[in-house]
Amino acid sequence: MNIRELSIPDSYEITPIQRSDDRGVFLEWYRFDLLEKTIGHPLVLRQANTSVSKRGVVRGIHFADVPIGQAKYVTATRGAVLDFVIDIRVGSPTFGKWDSVRLDDVERKAIYLAEGLGHAFVALTDDATVSYLVTDTYDAGKEHGINPLDPAVGLAFPEEAGSLLLSPKDTDAPSLDGAASAGLLPSWDSMRAYYNSLNGQ
């Protein structure tokens, strides 16, 4: 597989090598050793999630308190989504910016995002099925959100998504500035220290 760092530090696009024949296709969609070599530490996986979404469904922007936080390794096993990683680390050189990767059942890419980053996606097809591995179990008290329609973030949803459908939880979430003012966001310095601790430094 090929691993490429995105424009948001500590997030990566993973493109697997697919081998096909008259029986179908085989690929490795997750390799702990190759990811560990890239990010500097092994992932301790504690939960695996799957969501199925109608076209136009937006999920996120979500993030969890650190420590432990939730690093995520995300792929689409059916249909297509546009997956976003948002830098919500106060003081980061890319704070408030985002990058995206199309995840689908053709190229079968994945995306990795470290703890302390925001995550969202929009479904581009019906029955878009997204599976993701995470480094901690869900804890409602440590989970937070930012409104994905916040113009200060400016996520660009493609026409392919059609009409957007969001949950009240996500539309009621604060703006990026509101989350920062409420002290919900991690800092760049604290996250660098946390990543270094994971890397044994």
Image: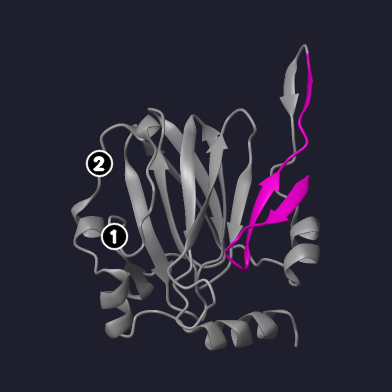
Question: What quarter of the picture does the N terminus occupy?
Answer: top right
172 above or below 181?
above
Which residue does the image show at 49% across and 33% down from the upper left? 80
Residue 120 placed where, x, y %? Answer: 41, 54
Q: Is residue 6 magenta?
A: yes
Callout 1: SS: loop
> How would you rate the neighbour count of disc 2 (Cα within 10 Å): few for under 14, some for 14-19, many for 20 or more?
some
Question: Which residue range is magenta in the image?
Answer: 1-21
**From the viewer's perspective, is the residue at label 1 or at label 2 nearer?**
1
* 61 left or right, relative to 136: left
Three-letter code, disc 1: Pro
Which residue does the image show at 63% across and 35% down from the upper left? 108
101 above or below 91?
above
98 and 117: which is toward the camera: 98
Which residue does the image show at 61% across and 83% down from the upper left? 192
**Quadrant assignment, res 170:** bottom left
* 90 left or right, relative to 33: left
144 above or below 190?
above
Residue 25 placed where, x, y %? Answer: 73, 24
Residue 182 placed where, x, y %? Answer: 27, 83
Three-letter code, disc 2: Leu
Q: CA distance from mark 1 to mark 2?
A: 17 Å
Which residue does the image show at 45% across and 59% down from the upper left? 119
145 and 7: which is toward the camera: 7
Return the residue at label 2: 165
Return the residue at label 1: 151
**Quadrant assignment, res 151:** bottom left
What label sits on residue 96 in the rendered view?
Answer: none
* 34 left or right, relative to 118: right
Question: What quarter of the picture does the C terminus occupy?
Answer: bottom right
